[in-house]
Image: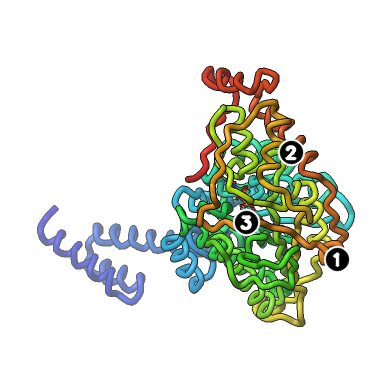
């Protein structure tokens, strides 16, 4: 190409950048009498026309499919939240307080799309007239699993959410998830601190209730991993209440009522017995208890500001089939079978409460929750909403030594016991529930004795882990080595 043409072509490009319109550019180039310049200008014109046409198409798409576009916006900001102001707040929760290992960040982007939304709506849809539609957090946990099953069995819609963390054996949580799936309940792998996903879930189906049971449990473990308690029980609760409050008459759906798990541990150093909801709860003995107490204060604020209907349930040492391997009755059963020593804290007594009784209490609390009253997109309440707290206990404390004696009988094997003074690790010597409020408001009446409840637990335990208790329980260990039986290695802490 002659230098003059290169020069002219370069000039053409400069002209192309600075000319006011494509036609004047074409004229100038044409007046130069150079055909190559004309071709170059034409291609630029073509390029511009293509860009314009693409923009027009995008505009057309946006007008016809706004939900899909907003979806992709949410996805692109999925590691935080839909609203810019809250996004930095939520992501800082995760970076400062969040535990690693939660699959939430990846789940946020994978849980989207038309097929996903259809699945959420299917799982959330009740199968009976006036049935509830409940988002259950911690659905692969002990109480969440049983409540989800019970809700589904009576025809309510249920969608579960769980982060499947490794505080205790996640394979047990996966087994619960599979069982729930077989009953038509979807349980998502997601963390409650994933505010964007919570917002998306609550915008996808008209949930009437949130049963918030996801939490960092375990009284004594709080000394080993304090941040996990703040992340789940404080930041996580706020994340759930934020998402629930954001629903309102001007949002897509109404605000759901929230029922959540508090704990008997809030009574802390209280000496009055049985524990009544009217007693002092300002002296927690552990960080676990302090985070549950903080949760009750947070619930008060969200009820007060946003008109969220909130019910806190103070669970008393819940036990039973599909239970938590970190709890004493479960780990003692495992140790008895394995012939390992167990350590008993002298004089410890608990108001052990059987899971079926607690599930009835949870469903009663959901059924009587009363509506949230938030308006203006959940930012203001139109009137007062219910704020409730109830004990869900068994009303008959039992010594831990007695609990072990029952286990020994059921397992047909003596425990190798070591009795020590209760260490100063956040534990409290006794619990005892007064449940008159729950009885009055939703007919809560625990009916299961420790003997009966532990029998159900041991039946499940030996069957689930394929233990031959006639052989003194030792068979499971031999079988475990072959890899044919379910693992008995239950991680007590992450
Ligand atoms: O009601 C609650 O809100 C809490 O209940 C449960 O806490 P706890 O009542 O402490 O249950 P759990 O650990 O099974 O110990 C049972 C008994 O065994 C005694 N205990 C325990 C361990 C041990 O090695 N030795 C021992 O004697 C111990 O002293 C106690 O007397 C839940 O874990 C907790 O998440 C929360 O939900």
Q: Nearer the viewer, mark 2 or mark 3?
A: 3
Q: Tell me which residue sits at (26%, 71%) in the image.
A: 28
Which one is earlier in the sequence, the residue at label 1 or at label 3? 3
Residue 494 in the image: state x and y as whole percent. Answer: 47, 45
Q: Which residue is the extreme one toward the left?
A: 3
Kind of element beneath mark 3 = loop
**Left or right placement of residue 309 versus residue 75 in this view:** right
Are the residues flagged by discs 1 and 3 in contact, CB closer than 8 Å?
no
Q: Which mark is residue 441?
A: 1
Specify few, some or many for label 2: CA neighbours under 10 Å numbering under 14, 14-19, or 20 or more: many
Distance of mark 1 from mark 3, alpha carbons? 29 Å
> How far across and down, in percent of the image, does residue 441 sit?
86, 66
Can residue 470 be seen here? The reply is yes
Q: Earlier in the sequence, mark 1 or mark 2?
A: 1
The residue nearer to you, when weighing 469 against 167, is: 469
Residue at mark 3: 429
Query: Residue 65: where, in percent of width, then height?
Result: 62, 60
| Distance between mark 2 and mark 3 Cα atoms | 21 Å
Horizontal side of 253 relative to 343 (left or right) equals right
Q: Residues within 10 Å of mark 3 (few under 14, many from 20)?
A: some
For disc 2, the marked residue is: 454
Asked whether residue 75 is in view, the answer is no
Q: Determine the residue positioned at 75% across, 60% down.
A: 433
Residue at image coords 29%, 57%:
39
State which quadrant residue 437 falls in.
Answer: bottom right
Nearer the N terminus, badge 2 or badge 3?
3
Q: Secondary structure at mark 1?
A: helix
Left or right: residue 2 compared with residue 69:
left
Is disc 3's CB within 8 Å of ligand 1? yes
């Amino acid at each position: 190409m002659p230098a003059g043409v290169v020069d002219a072509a370069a000039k053409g490009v400069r002209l192309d950048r600075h000319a006011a319109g494509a036609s004047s550019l074409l004229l100038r180039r044409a007046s130069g009498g150079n055909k190559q310049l004309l071709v170059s200008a034409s291609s630029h014109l073509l390029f511009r026309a293509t860009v314009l046409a693409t923009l027009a198409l995008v505009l057309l798409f946006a007008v016809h499919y706004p939900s899909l576009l907003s979806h992709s916006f949410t996805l692109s900001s999925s590691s935080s939240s839909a609203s810019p102001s809250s996004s930095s707040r939520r992501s800082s929760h995760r970076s400062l307080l969040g535990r690693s290992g939660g699959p939430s960040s990846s789940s946020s982007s994978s849980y989207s799309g038309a097929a996903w939304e259809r699945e959420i709506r299917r799982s959330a849809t009740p199968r009976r007239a006036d049935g509830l539609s409940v988002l259950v957090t911690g659905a692969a946990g002990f109480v969440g699993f049983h409540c989800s099953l019970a809700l589904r069995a009576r025809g309510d819609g249920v969608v579960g959410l769980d982060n499947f963390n490794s505080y205790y054996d996640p394979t047990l949580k996966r087994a619960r998830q599979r069982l729930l799936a077989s009953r038509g309940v979807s349980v998502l792998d997601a963390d409650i601190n994933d505010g964007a996903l919570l917002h998306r879930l609550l915008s996808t189906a008209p949930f009437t209730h949130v049963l918030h049971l996801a939490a960092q449990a375990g009284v004594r473990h709080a000394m080993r991993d304090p941040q996990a308690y703040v992340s789940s029980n404080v930041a996580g609760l706020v994340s759930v209440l934020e998402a629930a409050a954001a629903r309102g008459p001007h949002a897509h759906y109404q605000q759901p009522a929230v029922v959540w798990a508090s704990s008997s541990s809030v009574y802390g150093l209280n000496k009055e017995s049985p524990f009544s909801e009217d007693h002092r709860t300002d002296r927690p003995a552990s960080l676990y208890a302090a985070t549950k107490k903080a949760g009750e204060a947070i619930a008060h604020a969200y009820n007060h500001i946003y008109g969220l209907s909130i019910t806190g349930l103070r669970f008393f040492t819940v036990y039973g089939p599909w239970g938590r391997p970190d709890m004493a009755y479960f780990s003692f059963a495992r140790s008895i079978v394995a012939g390992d020593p167990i350590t008993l804290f002298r004089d410890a007594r608990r108001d052990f409460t059987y899971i079926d009784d607690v599930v009835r209490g949870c469903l009663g609390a959901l059924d009587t929750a009363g509506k949230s009253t938030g308006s203006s997109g959940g930012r203001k309440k139109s009137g007062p909403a219910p704020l409730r707290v109830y004990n869900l206990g068994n009303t008959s404390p039992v010594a831990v030594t007695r609990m072990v004696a029952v286990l020994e009988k059921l397992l047909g094997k003596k425990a190798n016991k070591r009795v020590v003074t209760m260490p100063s690790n956040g534990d409290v010597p006794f619990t005892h529930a007064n449940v008159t409020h729950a009885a009055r408001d939703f007919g809560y009446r625990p009916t299961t004795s420790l003997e009966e409840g532990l029998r159900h637990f041991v039946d499940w335990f030996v069957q689930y882990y394929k233990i031959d208790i006639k052989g003194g329980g030792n068979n499971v260990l031999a079988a475990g080595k072959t890899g044919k039986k379910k693992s008995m290695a239950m991680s007590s802490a992450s």
